[in-house]
């Protein structure tokens, strides 16, 4: 038996949006220097005792991940990134003439805390559930290089979890400590870079297709990034005397097309209109996402200018 409306009621539209940072550091930096005493000679790590080695590894991953993610941010165009040691940091700070011409930042990883533990819980059937947890804290300070004024002092803290299967004899699926250390450093580096600078995130929206030729044509135009033609086609379809069920989908599709064009005002008008026809939770959730995006845009405009 065939589908009444369509076997594929909607298709996904995938794109990226930029999220604002948590703080405003400015823009168009010439240089960012990150304190790292052991980045150039990682072989020395293996000469340390196990505790210091773990702290060094996690901070190394943190710093390199931070550097990699900051380089992708729009507030650091053509910025030179370098890793500096504490031995060279002091003369750098003292040499005012050298630093006064540079619009730069100095990021210092001030302290690290790590604590791993095993968590045991019982599920509804009284089976034991085991998790491995790595709690971590990173204290970071950021300075403006020209004035050497501290522009941010931040404590990043989080816990990563790994689940394990139950066994009478073994705890299965727990990561090796090196793996946990590796993941902890990377996770912290990503989060701190997002705290300091705007970043890109993947998004996906439902675009209704059904057996409607206009919807299918509009979707193809969107795939070709011909947004104006897609909006014209959808508006033309909307002007016809159609059922409420079809109209709510037309309005939703228009909202998606306007969002892709970065016209969030019209996108929100269409999304709200779609929700008013029928109090659909999906349409309500989409309108809420658009409201958050409008707030993000205000923050981004402030951070990037």
Image (cartoon, rainbow, N blue to C red):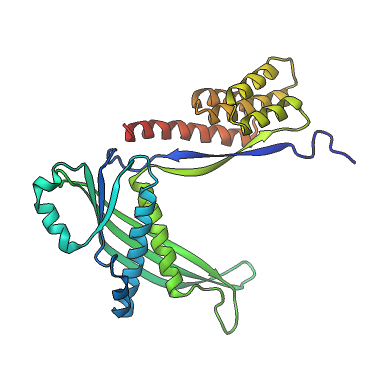
**Closest to the observer, 7 or 280:** 7
Give left or right: position of 221 versus 61. Answer: right
Can you say whether 138 is above or below 250 in the image? Answer: below
Which quadrant does the N terminus fall into?
Answer: top right
Query: What residue appears at the point 26 percent right and 62 percent down from the top-left corner?
Result: 36
Residue 194 appears at what percent x and percent y? 38, 48
Does residue 271 appear anywhere in the picture?
no
Residue 77 appears at what percent x and percent y? 33, 41
Can you say whether 179 is above or below 271 in the image? Answer: below
Where, by quadrant of the figure, is residue 14 drawn?
Answer: top right
Which quadrant does the C terminus fall into?
Answer: top left
Q: Residue furthest bottom?
A: 169
Give left or right: position of 21 versus 269. Answer: left
Q: Which residue lies furthest to the right in this view?
A: 1
**Closest to the observer, 299 or 116:** 299
Residue 222 appears at what percent x and percent y? 62, 30
Does residue 91 appear anywhere in the picture?
yes
Give left or right: position of 212 versus 68. Answer: right
Residue 270 appears at what percent x and percent y? 58, 24
Q: How many labels does the image show?
A: 0
Query: What residue appears at the point 42 percent right and 73 percent down from the top-left corner?
Result: 178
Give left or right: position of 58 versus 176. Answer: left
Can you say whether 239 is above or below 302 in the image? Answer: above
Query: What residue appears at the point 9 percent right and 45 percent down from the top-left corner?
Result: 97
Query: What residue appears at the point 11 percent right and 57 percent down from the top-left corner?
Result: 91
């Amino acid at each position: 038996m065939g589908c009444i409306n369509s076997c594929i009621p909607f298709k996904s539209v995938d794109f990226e949006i930029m999220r604002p940072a948590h703080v405003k550091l400015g823009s168009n930096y010439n240089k960012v220097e990150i304190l790292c005493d052991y980045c150039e000679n990682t072989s020395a790590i293996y000469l340390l005792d196990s505790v210091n080695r773990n702290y060094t590894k996690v901070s190394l991953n943190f710093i390199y991940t931070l550097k990699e993610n900051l380089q992708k941010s729009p507030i650091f165009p053509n910025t030179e990134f370098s890793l500096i040691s504490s031995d060279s940091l002091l003369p750098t700070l003292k040499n005012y003439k050298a630093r006064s011409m540079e619009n730069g930042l100095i990021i210092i990883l001030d302290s690290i805390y790590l604590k791993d533990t095993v968590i045991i819980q019982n599920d509804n059937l009284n089976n034991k559930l085991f998790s491995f947890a790595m709690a971590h804290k990173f204290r970071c300070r950021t300075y403006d290089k020209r004035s050497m004024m501290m522009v941010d002092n931040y404590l990043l803290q989080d816990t990563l979890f790994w689940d394990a299967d139950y066994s009478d004899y073994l705890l299965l699926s727990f990561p090796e400590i090196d793996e946990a250390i590796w993941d902890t450093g990377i996770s912290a580096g990503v989060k701190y870079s997002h705290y300091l600078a705007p970043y890109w995130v993947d998004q996906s929206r439902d675009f209704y297709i059904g057996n409607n030729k206009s919807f299918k044509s509009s979707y193809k135009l969107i795939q070709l990034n011909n947004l104006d033609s897609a909006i014209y086609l959808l508006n033309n379809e909307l002007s016809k005397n159609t059922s409420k069920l079809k109209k709510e989908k037309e309005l939703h599709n228009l909202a998606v097309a306007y969002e892709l064009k970065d016209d969030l005002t019209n996108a929100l008008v269409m999304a709200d209109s779609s929700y008013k026809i029928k109090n659909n939770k999906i349409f309500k959730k989409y309108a809420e996402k658009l409201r958050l995006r409008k707030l993000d845009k205000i923050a981004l405009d402030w951070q990037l200018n």
